[in-house]
């Protein structure tokens, strides 16, 4: 595998778009992590925060159907539900 030189990377026509996307991803990730730590700090029980956060699995699973034309079967639905149930059991 050949690694391109720095000059070639900087002069690429896609470099600014890649840099902008990387910067946006880095800032979004930092804000998300900060919000996650704040939620854990402020929650009466840190496990409750984790249980609520794990429900994102179901939201993302069902949102992927119209956005990405993803297929949905019983196994995927049961996987998401079992993840959420397992997190709530850990909280209890």
Image (cartoon, rainbow, N blue to C red):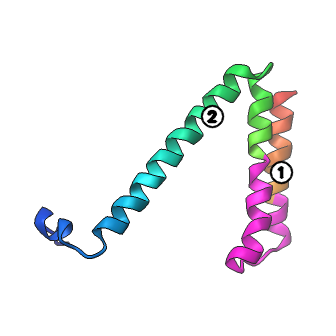
| Range drawn in magenta | 55-78
Near-viewer residue (22 or 52):
22
In the rendered structure, the answer to whether residue 26 lies left or right of residue 31 reads left
Q: Where residue 17 appears, x then y in whole percent?
A: 37, 68
Counting other residues with Cα less than 10 Å from the Cα at mark 2, is it few (<14), some (14-19), or many (20 or more)? few
Task: Please identify the quadrant where the C terminus is shown.
Answer: top right
Say which residue appears at 79% left-offset and 57% top-offset: 59
Say which residue appears at 67% left-offset and 77% top-offset: 68
- The main secondary structure of the magenta stretch is helix
The residue singled out by tag 2 in the image is 35
Say which residue appears at 11% left-offset and 66% top-offset: 7
The residue singled out by tag 1 in the image is 82
- C-alpha gap between disc 2 and disc 1: 25 Å
Task: Please identify the quadrant where the N terminus is shown.
Answer: bottom left
Q: Where residue 36 appears, x then y in whole percent?
A: 64, 34
Task: Compare marks 2 and 1 and give the one earlier in the sequence.
Answer: 2
Compared to residue 73, the image places residue 89 above or below, namely: above
Compared to residue 76, the image places residue 36 above or below, namely: above
Residue 71 within the magenta-colored segment of the rendering: yes
Task: Report helix, strand or loop for mark 1.
Answer: helix
Say which residue appears at 82% left-offset and 41% top-offset: 86
Counting other residues with Cα less than 10 Å from the Cα at mark 1, is it few (<14), some (14-19), or many (20 or more)? few
């Amino acid at each position: 595998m050949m690694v391109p030189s720095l000059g070639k990377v900087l002069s690429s026509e896609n470099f600014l778009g890649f840099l902008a996307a990387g910067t946006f991803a880095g800032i979004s990730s930092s804000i998300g992590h900060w919000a996650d730590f704040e939620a854990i700090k402020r929650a009466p029980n840190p496990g409750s925060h984790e249980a609520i956060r794990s429900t994102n699995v179901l939201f993302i699973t069902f949102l992927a159907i119209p956005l990405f034309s993803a297929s949905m079967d019983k196994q995927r639905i049961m996987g998401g539900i079992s993840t959420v149930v397992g997190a709530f059991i850990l909280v209890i």
